[in-house]
Image: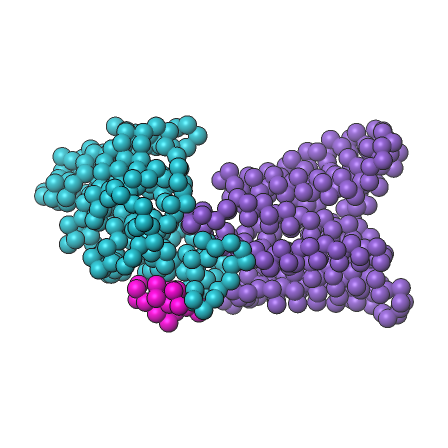
Amino acid sequence: MQHSSDAGIEERSVSLHNVYAGYNGKSVLVDVTFKLESPFFAVLMGPNGAGKTTLLRVIIGLLKPIKGDVTVYGIRPWEKPEVIRETIGYVPQLLLVRQDVPVRVEEVVAMGILSRLPPPRRLTKRIRDEVGKALSMVGLEGLEGRLFNELSGGQKQRVLIARALVRKPKLLVLDEPCSMLDFKARCEMIKLLQKLHVERGVDILLTAHDISPCLILEPTVILINKRVYAVGKLRDVLRPETLKLAYPGMTEVEGAIILGEDHVPH
Amino acid sequence: MSLINPILIPVYLAAVLSGLLAGSVSPALAYSKSVTFGITLMHSVLAGALIGVYLHDALHLPVNPLLTAVVMSLTASLLTAEAVARGFPEDAAVAISVSVSVSVAVIMTYIVALTTPYGVSKAFGYVFGVSALATWHDVVRLAAVLVMVIPLIHLFWCEFKYVAFDPEGAEAMGLPVRAYRYLYYFTASVAAASLAMSLGVLLAHIIISVPGLLALRARSPNPFKLSYFVGVAVMTIGYALAWSLNIPPSGGVGVIASGALVTLLVMRRES
């Protein structure tokens, strides 16, 4: 896939250095530092309130850090938002999308293209063709005319991914793409993301509570709870002594680990 | 009085235009969970009318209370939009602007009562309206507002709907979400203020919410056909009913609108 943002991108990494970010002057993220070299499939893992969504908002340029430096393929997101929007496809949490607004699947996906154009934003044949291609990438061909709120949770997530893909991004950032899905649907979602990563060369960064569907992919895991506790491959990060740092409520029971959702910062 | 009396022509024309105007802005308000925005308008128009009456009658300044009413309702709409932009849910944002409008209205009621003999009742006249006495002047004003509002709504409908559907996603894709919010609250406020001047705020409040709610319930991606139809039907049938039963027009429209809302309840229960 030719990424719309390839031109002008020299550095091939997403890098955060001593980043502090939050709301109303209060830091949610403390001294966050890590670097992801492209190509990457990375999972941000941490308990509720760990700052995962805040970190994504910093990376996509919706939130300027209080302190520290962020570069996405060599670009500071808040300095060149128009370039970042072409580079990153963002998939928000399904919970944040209003389900009662009657919008057709086609309209949702088309907004990925229409948002680049000035008003009046109307669906043309070219845009419909692009929408059809994006929907077939996520396995939803033929659903253009359906209402978004009539779809299953997994299909809704796929529609939002298609909306991001229609912009041909270099990096796909997904906030809890597996929430509200059953285990089978989670595994299918991760398989889809893996396919996009391997076949189309899209870097993937997602947040997750439960990374078990991702285990087979050996992703890079960033363990976070306000600050980053570990970055690395699964087997290096998912160790009891490391997990305990980010999950203070973690309990070990005869070889098994129960991850608590306590997010008291250290 | 006969239903086809020539004196009623501007009244029915005003009813049709009001229905169209309400039908145009109502879906945007319903989709963004802001149908209670009518309450903001009711109180802000009262507050603005009281300020205008005070300036005109007590201070003898050349100020038209209708103008101050419009300015106050626009201010309240901008306050609502800003509150939403700062992260308040739509209903909380409406509550904030209602509180401010009510506070101004209460303070101004006290001041106007102290300084003018009939000022308070004059200002309340704008709230309860004189829809039975719609004039050609009202028809022209409604038509002028209609010409401005309808193209704006249709030009930006795609964006209004998208901002209501997924504001964070829209912002991430570069849509100026805050600007669109300002635009639709502003547009709704202009339409509602015009409706309030012609029909009275109580009637305007009813008519501005019903078409959008029915369209939202019908789950149509393009709600305007139904919204315009409901707006015009509620107004004209309501007026005809009022004349037939010799009750105030607001009452007739209220009865029809209530019937539509009961239908909505039945639809909700059955689905």
Q: Nearer the viewer, residue A222 or B124?
A: A222
Residue at position x 82%, y 32% in the image: B55
Residue at position x 33%, y 56% in the image: A168
Q: What is the span of residues highlighted in magenta in the rendered image?
A: A129-153
Snapshot quadrant of residue B11: bottom right
Decide if residue A119 is on the left or right side of residue B19. left
The relative height of residue B256 versus residue B44 in the rendered view (above or below) is: below
Task: Give the color scheme: rainbow, by chain, secondary structure or one colour.
Answer: by chain
Snapshot quadrant of residue A243: top left
Q: Which of A179 and A14 is in front in this view?
A: A14
The relative height of residue B208 versus residue A133 in the rendered view (above or below) is: above
- Outermost residue toward the left in this view: A255
Q: Chain A is drawn in which colour?
A: cyan
Q: Does the magenta stretch include residue B239?
A: no
Would residue A98 be seen by someone viewing this image from the given angle? no
- Residue B90 drawn at (x, y percent): 54, 45
Q: Is residue A152 magenta?
A: yes
Shown in purple, the chain is B
Q: Quadrant of the N terminus of chain B?
A: bottom right
- Residue A158 drawn at (x, y percent): 33, 60
- Residue B122 drawn at (x, y percent): 84, 41
Q: Nearer the viewer, residue B59 or A46?
A: B59
The relative height of residue B26 versus residue A43 in the rendered view (above or below) is: below
Would residue A43 be seen by someone viewing this image from the given angle? yes
Residue at position x 77%, y 46% in the image: B127
